[in-house]
Amino acid sequence: MIEIKHLNKSFADRQVLFDINATFHRGIVNMIIGASGTGKSVLLKCIVGIEEPNSGQVLFDGRSFYHTSRDEQREIRREIGMLFQGGALFDSKNVIENVRFPLDILMPQMPMSEKLDRVHFCLKRVGLENAGKKRPSELSGGMKKRVGIARAIVMQTNRYLFCDEPNSGLDPQTSIVIDNLIDEITKEYNLTTVVVSHDMNSMMEIGDHIIFIHQGRIVWEGSNENIVETASAELEQFIFSNKLMRKFRDKIY
């Protein structure tokens, strides 16, 4: 479980997050949604420690990330897997080397044979057991995202999975594959998964718990089952700007 308490973030004299309070539970897909520029990606960066908030706390199963020692921060980071928007693969490394990278950095004492066993297990889990020798330039967009997921779960200590716009740049069919993979891995490994997205299809498919951010504030929280019944004007405008969602609303009502 991840708890965010009274988190505020500013850049120079511009405040982008205002008193954010949220709880992300284990074993489900938690989604942060909102239009571009509303602060959702900044919130994700504050949670994982890429950006430091001006005030507030981020608690990982009761452990405060910003009010603890560097050693404790390193321990928490060892439990975090991250899927970046663009995949963030190393062009100079093949798939096996890319997936192995967190083990090389965080667990240098692990024997190479154990690292490779773990890498091959993770690649098989995402359906890429035969792609280990390929370079990122030889992969499709969906394959790159699956390599990113394999790398995000390669640490056996992982308890938290963060995904930043995992379907960005993908076709609808491949997006469904990535959504299903994130959902399956979340439940299989009992992870606390947080997905930042503005993809309405993903939200309706795998959004077990959703928070909607508008102008740096949480203005709605709930599940994909009750989101179409929202009384929030800002959320309604955001959701039904999508043609598919308008058809879904019209069908219901």
Image (tube, rainbow, N blue to C red):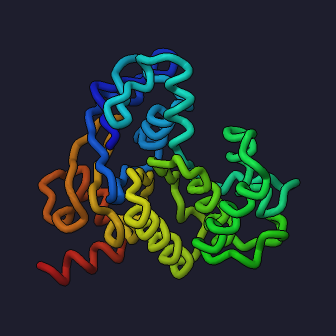
Identify the residue at image location x=32%, y=63%. 207
* Nearer to us in this view, 164 or 37: 164
Identify the residue at image location x=30%, y=32%. 20
With respect to residue 86, does 7 lie above or below?
Answer: above
From the viewer's perspective, tell me whether residue 156 is left or right of residue 114. Answer: left
Identify the residue at image location x=27%, y=41%. 23
> Is residue 84 visible to us here?
no
Quadrant housing residue 118: bottom right
Where residue 67 sits in the image (x, y, percent)?
41, 17
The quadrant of the picture occupied by the C terminus is: bottom left
With respect to residue 39, does 32 lie above or below?
Answer: below
Where residue 144 sits in the image (x, y, percent)?
68, 65
* Nearer to us in this view, 205 or 67: 67
Where residue 215 sits in the image (x, y, percent)?
34, 37
> Is residue 87 visible to us here?
yes
Q: How many labels sit on residues? A: 0
Quadrant housing residue 169: bottom right
Identify the residue at image location x=35%, y=31%. 59
In the displayed image of the protein, which residue is found farthest to the right? 92
From the viewer's perspective, tell me whether residue 111 is left or right of residue 121. Answer: right
Where residue 146 sits in the image (x, y, percent)?
62, 67
The quadrant of the picture occupied by the N terminus is: top left
* Nearer to us in this view, 37 or 154: 154
From the viewer's perspective, tell me whether residue 193 is left or right of residue 154. Answer: left
* Nearer to us in this view, 18 or 119: 119
